[in-house]
Amino acid sequence: MGNSYAGQLKSARFEEALHNSIEASLRCSSVVPRPIFSQLYLDPDQPPFLPEDVKPKVEDLDKELVHRYSQNGSLDFSTNQTVNEMEDEEEDEDMSDSSSPPIPYSQKPAPEGSCTTDGFCQAGKDLRLVSLCMEQIDIPAGFLLVGAKSPNLPEHILVCAVDKRFLPDDHGKNALLGFSGNCIGCGERGFRYFTEFSNHINLKLTTQPKKQKHLKYYLVRSSQGVLSKGPLICWKECRSRQSSAANLSAKPNPSVSPSATPEGGSANGYKSGFTQTDSSVFSPAKSSSAAVNLSGTQDPSRNKNIVKPLALSVQLVGKAFAAAPLSLRATDVANGNANGGRNNALSTTVSRPMPHSTSPSPGCAAGDQASMSSSGPPKKRHRGWSPGSPVPPPGLAVPVPTIRPSTRTEPLLSVPVPQSMLTGILQPQPIPAGETVIVPENLLNNSGVRPVILIGYGTLPYFYGNVGDIVVSPLLVNCYKIPQLENKDLDLLGLSSSQLLSVENMILLTIQYLVQLGPDQIPLREEFEQIMLKAMQEFTLRERSLQMSAQCISVSPGQLPWLARLIASVSRDLVHVVVTQNSLAEGISETLRSLNEMKHQQKLPDYVVAICASKIRGNEFCVVVLGQYQSRALAESMLTTSEFLKEISYELITGKVSFLASHFKNTSLGDDLDKLLEKMLQQRGESVIIPFNGDVSECVSSQEAIAMVSTQEPDLDVDTFQIYQPQLTVARKLLSQVCAIADSGNQSLDLGHFSKVDFIVIVPRSEVLVQQTLQRIRQSGVLVDLGLEDNGTAYQRAEKYVVRLDNEIQAKFEVFMRRVKQNPYTLFVLVHDNAHVDLTSAISSSLSHGEPNHGLADRVINCREVLEAFNLLVLQVSSFPYALQTQQSRISSSNEVHWIQSDTVDDAASEEKLYFGLNEYSKSLQWGVTSPLLRCDETFEKMVNTLLERYPRLHSMVIRCYLLIQQYSQALMALTTMASLRDHSTPETLSIMDDLITSPGKDKNGCGHMLVIRVPSVQLAMLAKERLQEVRDKLGLQYRFEILLGNPASELTVAKHFITRLKAWRGNEQDDWIPRTYQDLEGLPCIVILTGKDPLGETFPRSLKYCDLRLIDSSYLTRTALEQEVGLACCYVSKEAIRGPVVALDLSEKEQEKANCSENDSDELLIDLDRPQSNSSAVTGTSGSLADNGVSSSSAADKSQKQAPSLNFQAVAHSSVDEGAYSSFTARETLKQECDSLGNQMASSTTPKLSSLSSVSQTFQWPAQSAKDSKALRVALPRIVILSKAAYCLLSSQKNGNLPSSSSLLPHADVSWLSSLRPLLHKDMSSEEQSLYYRQWTTARQHHADFSNQAEASGTRTFHPRRLLLTGPPQVGKTGSYLQFLRILFRMLIRLLEVDVYDEEEINTNHTENSEVTQSSNDHWPDIEIFSKISFDLSVHDPKYRNISPVYTEQLSRVKQEASKETKSEEPKKRETVSMMLTKYAAYNTFHHCEQCHQYMDINPAAQVSDSTLHAFTFSSSMLGEEVQLHFIIPKSKENHFVFSKQGKHLESMRLPLVSDKNLNAVKSPIFTPSSGRHEHGLLNLYHAMEGISHLHLLVVKEYEMPLYRKYWPNHIMLVLPGMFNNAGVGAARFLIKELSYHNLELERNRLEELGVKRQCVWPFIVVMDDSCVLWNMHSPHEQSSQSLEPGSFSKNVSLKSVLQHIEATPKIVHYAILGVQKWNSKLNTRKSKAPFSRCHVRDFILLNIDLTQNVQYDLNRYFCEDVDFNLRTNSSGLLICRFNNFSVMKKHIQVGGQKDFVVKPKIMVSDSVAPIMPLQYVCAPDSEHTLLAAPSQFLLEKFLQHATYKLFPKAIHNFKNPVLAIDCYLNIGLEVAICYISSRPHSVNVNCEGVFFSGLLLYLCDSFVGADLLKRFRFLKGATLCVICQDRSSLRQTIVRLELEDEWQFRLRDEFQTANSSDDEPLYFLTGRHI
């Protein structure tokens, strides 16, 4: 072990120095000779060290820090290399004396694919001076260009950039040891070893690379700028090492790593100088330098106990100043995060809290876990120290510098990145003699303890001597540095200020905390922080109540010592207090000395609190941890997972474990294990134990064993894939979040743009996980559903959709990104599963030359292409998302989707299985059953503790693993052959193995249980597998159960005979089937030894029964690390397995109520047991699936569903679990016993699973089952978890217990707490609240991938807009959920491309008269001559109007109408709709975004709304009899459509084209769209419908809605109706549009007339169009040659532009009053071709001739049927209405806004809950006490008339021969009554009503044209009824008189009515009467 040339180290120099030293001491008169170390390392002629010398170098220092701490060498242990490739370059003095033989040096091979040409670097870039002499080379400050000589290219010089600190000055002195250089060819930076650099630049050396040998010249630029060879580098003086020990430490040594530790790793349980990426690997060669055996033992294998410290030197240029070799964790230093979770302390000076500054002095840029262990002598084993050398080195100083900057209040290096870190001047303080501690020799050997010093408050002393035997931990240091908080945070915490605790208080709190810690607990930062917080809160309360300052509460320094001792006195001697007066060093020295001299039988205290009560400096303190368990656990907990795994592999490789291994060679009885096994093998001979269906004592020959196959198919619980309700719900939540992103208005996602979904799933490196994901994708059928693959190919092609994060990902990912770029209309979803694994940033991992696959996730997920691709969504999925929820998170908290809590799922009662996760495991401890699910093996822990004391130098996991292997081996032997060993196995291990071996024996098929043993270290796992396999095979159990290694890096390998058995069980697998996932092992009795740094979310089969986590101990002190281990056991379990115990034993009332009500709820939630496996419309499309998480229901759900309808949950709910179902006492007792028995059965294998149900079924009173249904009753039980003591304590913390729970730990090793003062994280917080908590209180460490996402100057963080996070507990079914999400996302995109349009056939087609005028079916336009001869069809055919009164025609009178049977329901019938694909010509709402129309939609965003101007426009209306003022809002871009006055920009008119204009790129008619309540949903975007051409579109909106419409449609012209019309109906809008247009037409005619245009040439048409018109179609008759024989036509989608242009081209168009198109329905094409033009009602979309219809008005008061009324008026005026039948318009079904009814409420509310008011109550007698209503009078009237038919016109009902006569108006008076419309105007066209007797007369606001003469023309039935409606009572009376109605009609006083309005609302009055 050691350097490859370790044997040739020369000791000459050391001997010489030693000799001189002895000689000097003999000669010298003074007593103390100069120590040999100073002779060796201090140059006598060095000038004294002055602070000024440091000043110019401050920047260098921080550059160096940042630089150094981010790079490290690396060595891959998998090759068991023990030689360090990056040779220790501090053997670099060119001092191999000439006599010494050359040092053989084997060069590391170049990485694959790199360039190896001489003169070029490995990246293939030219480095030769001749090629670079003219180049401009950029080098960082502080670097120089030097020339290197390559032995293979003597004529060339290679150019390198080297940090000048590592080069000598002109005297050949002061070169720092080591090297720092950059390659100027490829630009790679940060080579920390010359060896590494020489490899990179291809020097190809045969000897050890030395910078002194190979860096020859400085390079200089000549005056012409040519780079040329300069002076030689003067290395000569280097032979005498000038630097002191401190100078040595000045170079941060990248090779310090946990692996260097002495056995057990606790030696230096501190963070080494590495990034958290664990990229550095200890290079064992370093131990040659660490091999100074200070422990005095002669055993060479023991001398690795010193680890070289990594130091931050204050002295930079070799000035002699002792700096602390602190072992630092690089990233943390660079991160400088003063509160990081595991940050490191740069020095431990903690200043007193100053009045203003709360921050500790710089010395403490400390975080929690880094250690300050200083170790060992100078960096190398220097010549002359033989390992056994008896000369102890005199005080080797390992000081901790007290660097106090003169300016600065924050901690040193707390600035995150390489900004200048030290602004103050470093002023080294002299070291007083009293402040040093000499660590005694052989401390660890003598005491068996490596003390951990917890930095407290104040300056730690300097440590000299055997510093490898102590560890310095900053675990609690941040708790004492109380941060300054903002006021809002202080209020949140209930504090008045953050300066409440004096140092004395902190000391007492610390002692109290240590006293109350249990013997198997270690101090936890999080726990202590809460104690400090509580203390501060109490002080605040006290301060407030006593109204005095906190100072009164403080303890005086004099009281402190006795108070401290008083508190410690109750600790049963476990906490001691040592008080000293001068310095902490005294207390620590005394403690270490007494520890060293301790007799073995003496009891050590666990903690010694050293307090220095100094008068000058005030109180300081620290804690020395001496407890055997505590000190080791603290030291080990300081290593990250990767670091301790490297430590373990180092211990295994270097053979340190040999003592331990030899200890375990024997059984507990002392026999030699191997011999015993051999003996048993011989006894057994050829035969083996029967594989299954037989006892362990039965033997068969191995051939028979192989041939045994199960006879029948077992009822295996094999999972079918099915999507369960919670998964559906979560998928929908994901979808709605995606929609929210699309709607957010920041244009980051345009869903309307995509028509397809594609995806890729990225998973961590785990072969099983890849196969498992593939399996889910295949079973879910998602590839086929998304249309990505065909049914046939989907199986093979699935592999392209799952990519694992390994070296090949770059290529695969580039292919994926190419697909993303090439398919802009496909929405890609990048699913990053297990996103919390490997969060290292790509930068930090490349700088550290780290493990090759580190930072890959960052490279992929956060690369620029991914961030910028507009068609790529990133979905990160994680069970432990805490590391993604920091202050720097890239995911907005609103984009997190959390799994639904089980209590919120309505149908929890109907789900057959319930999720059993971490919380349930913790709660299960309160069930009170005898065999709990979470267990701690106390016996095992005791054995471990004994071994830990015996082997203090080995990592505890190694010891635990060896013990575990022995336990399982002995249990196997005890159960088969050697019963005597039973007592030597722990009961837990024995019962597990018993269950494992016996269960196949009891099963006819050989099914059994699975046991998972978690062994994180791959080497240990392989060892365990080999040992256990060997024992199993020698005992003949190889056919009984399998032992598998679950290594993420490799596939599963299962023995052939077990595969045969698995195939036989599955029945239908192909011949070449092999198990690829753990789920495939369902039913196989086996032990899986699961290894790897983290469990990666693999799903285990239902047959997994035991999880052995006894190796997971105090190294797992972050929430993620601990919970993901226990996550292995989480699964879905049968309801019965949980319900019973919970109800029975939670005696708190609230829980009891909860339990009862949850049982009772189940009767509403009756499960539909016959539901189909998959309901394609609602659920999955093609495939059902059973829980994706591998936790399926017993025997595929469908079987149990179909066979067991008797499993009626309703019955259960009513009969047995109802609150009153059984008396509380007996029920509780019986249940209690049953739970215990259930627990026993779960734990022991003696009862098969089925019978364990029987006990529960008594409670639940299941209906009797037939035998064949017993499958359905197979219970899925929770797994049993065996934990280590440390993990058990964290997970089992009771609700009221004061133990911390795992949730309060640091969430992840890659993040750190922001402040030590923060509120407590409650266990009951929902995951949303936890996320917000972590986002507020944690921050990413420097190497974390999110670290770079710092807040910008504005203080906002950049969230990636298209990134979502799906979180849910482990194994809950997240994969199924995101696959379902992909499916419904696709469906929604298709849905977005579809629109629901009305599809209703025309009504009243039988009333239509056949037009005798024939038209040619091929005409494009109507011929006015022919068309005017067609008679108008009065009947309304629009299906929307199926419930209105029919219009009387002669045909109608022949129609027999029966009384309809059913009474008309209030609810209108749901109208028929059909889904249509949108085409490129559709009209859109605000949710549509695309590149083409965004200009049309938005003004440029910078300009905002102010860009449009408001114009008033006034005109007089004869109808209203007053001036009307409308407002136009006109965007700048649309002003060209208007005419403004020359001065003052007054709006004059809207431009109109001429009739003769022929512009193909425009439509002539302005388009008016009245809209209300549909600012988002109205189809007001006509860009595509108009094919992008110029058009004039005006939105007509009510005044109060204007701001909303303006916000959503900033680029549209708005016409704002006057405020008086806010409550008006659609009639008012149409009336004003028409009035305005006519007025504008007159203005334009006048304007153009001045320009010489004839008046009649101005275009008189406008388009009035609804806001729900979406698509237009053209229908043309079939060609004759068409194949189809059926009559009909074909249709195609056309644009609105083409429809309008076609209609506008109608010949003689100005003679038509209204032109329209028909309304689309699906039958249009199949019907016989009808006439191309009809003269009938048109609506929804009309061209209106405002000139012709000047005298026909819309009724502005109307709410309903205003268009029918208008059409009838227009027709009776003799004007032409033409409908083009070869065009149709589709109307979208929009659920919001539009012409909706008012909610009619009383004007004055009496009470809140009013019964709905019926329409018949809308009118009342005048002056009555009736409830007055808050609704417009006209609305009330129209509604009343619709519903009052039976009262008003009894004679007319179902009597179409005798219609009601309505003069000048059409009002809907109910479906049962026909209305005969007659116009009173002279020369009007009316229906022929000769001989018709009318059954009623309706007069509505009649004008002067209606006279008594007119009425006398008509005849009425006897008893016909009359209804006269007027504006007020007086006009009502006048009308009656004027029309002489009293002659023929009889009136009664009580027949007068008014609408139920108050008089302010102007009610309408009407009078009814009977015909005499």
Image (spheres, rainbow, N blue to C red):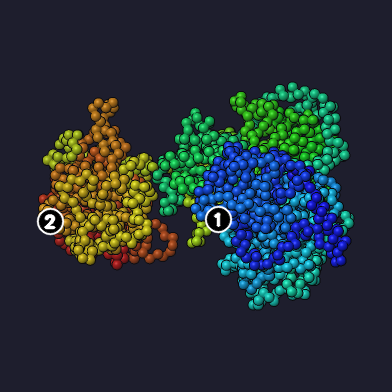
**Image x and y of residue 16, in percent:** 82, 53
Q: Quadrant of the N terminus?
A: top right
1970 and 318: which one is in front? 318
| Residue 698 in sight from this viewpoint | yes
1238 over 1032 or under it: above or below: below
Looking at the image, tell me whether mark 1 or mark 2 is earlier in sequence order: 1
User: Which numbered circle lies on residue 1651?
Assistant: 2
Separation of disc 1 and disc 2 at Cα? 68 Å
1527 and 73: which is toward the camera? 73
Local secondary structure at mark 2: loop
Question: Which of the 4 quarters of the picture holds residue 1729?
Answer: top left
Q: Residue 42's image quarter?
A: bottom right
Residue at 48 percent of width and 61 percent of height: 1354
Q: Are marks 1 and 2 in contact (CB under 8 Å)?
A: no
**Quarter of the rendering occupied by the C terminus:** bottom left
Near-viewer residue (1540 or 742):
1540
Q: Residue at x 43, y 40 (%)?
A: 823
The residue lying at 21 percent from left, 39 percent from top is 1408
The residue at 62%/72% (across/down) is: 356
| Residue underneath mark 1 | 888
